[in-house]
Image (cartoon, helix red, strand yellow):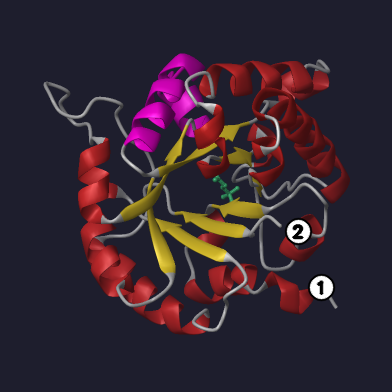
Amino acid sequence: MRKPILAANWKMHKTIGEAVAFAKAFAPLVADVTGAEIVIAPPFPALAAVGAALRGTHVLLAAQNVHPEKQGAFTGEVSPPMLVDLGCAYAIVGHSERRHIFGEASAFVARKAAALLAHGVRPIVCVGETLEEREAKRTFAVLEEQLRGSLAEVAIEQAADVVIAYEPVWAIGTGRTATPAIAQEAHAMIRSWLQTSFGAAGDAMRIQYGGSVKPDNVSVLMAEPDIDGALVGGASLDAASFAGIVRYQEKSK
Ligand code: PGA
């Protein structure tokens, strides 16, 4: 059984004060949810304060990015040991905004994922096609290329610690969610690629869907057999809204 994983990706939102206020309001709303992993990825400046506010809860902390080196002359970057120091359980790598706005290639994403695993931080590796690629019927080819490149340095024994986030670029921040059938089709392809590459561990790996997930569409997405969680941007910025997403099972009836 794969434990569902619901993660908030705040992107470049919230000051430290706003982030702490969210954490304090949010944790009690999900205190009784034990069947899923709940993760919040605040921007770097708020990690320490959110970590402190979440202490004693079961909500886990994540970073939105990392640099693969341990330390050195990399102005503006943050290393895996620094994330460990902050208490991060997860870090997002290869988000489409990093790939498309900051020009990050899969080979660089692969180094980040490997560095995180070496330090005991679990990577959430994002993949997803653009609208142009989907319309050109290149979705599977693009996903395969991104998976192969981004997971190139993951060993079979480490694979179960890796979470994949399928985020079609055309669905991110657009309000245009993939239908459950479209998402499941991509997730099934990703699942079969993971099984071929990592054997039994490919069955254990969680695959999140991301792209305009909201409290009112999360349960139909989660009902699909290969959708094991959600990576949520816009709808995770409000405590009640993200709590509604985490409590998706209550909406499925
Ligand atoms: P969205 O973002 O929920 O605002 O579409 C998802 C993401 O980019 O992770």
Tags 2 and 1 touching, CB below 8 Å: yes
Which badge, 2 or 1, comes first in the chain's sequence?
Answer: 2
Residue 57 occupies quadrant: bottom left
Q: Identify the disc placed on residue 252.
A: 1
Q: Identify the disc placed on residue 151.
A: none
Given residues 88 and 132, the one toward you in this image is 88
Q: Name the residue at 73% across, 73% down.
A: 249
CB at disc 1 and ligand 1 closer than 8 Å: no
Tell whether 115 sits left or right of 105.
left
Give the Cα distance between marks 2 and 1.
9 Å
Which element carries disc 1, helix, strand or loop? loop
Can you see residue 164? yes
Q: Residue furthest left?
A: 73
Given residues 102 and 5, the one toward you in this image is 5
Q: Quadrant of the C terminus?
A: bottom right
Name the amino acid type tagged 1.
Ser
Magenta residues span 95-118
Q: Position of residue 33 (x, y in %)?
A: 57, 78
CB at disc 2 and ligand 1 closer than 8 Å: no
Q: Residues within 10 Å of mark 2 (few under 14, many from 20)?
A: many
Instruction: Work out whether 38 lies above or below 196.
Output: below
Tell whether 79 sits left or right of 64.
left
Q: Position of residue 227 (x, y in %)?
A: 74, 50
Residue 49 occupies quadrant: bottom left
Q: Which residue is labeled 2 in the image? A: 222
Name the amino acid type tagged 2.
Met
* Majority SS type along the magenta span: helix
Which element carries disc 2, helix, strand or loop? helix
Q: Name the residue at 53% across, 40% down.
A: 162
Q: Residues within 10 Å of mark 1 (few under 14, many from 20)?
A: few
Q: Does 176 lie within the magenta span? A: no
Q: Position of residue 182 (x, y in %)?
A: 84, 40
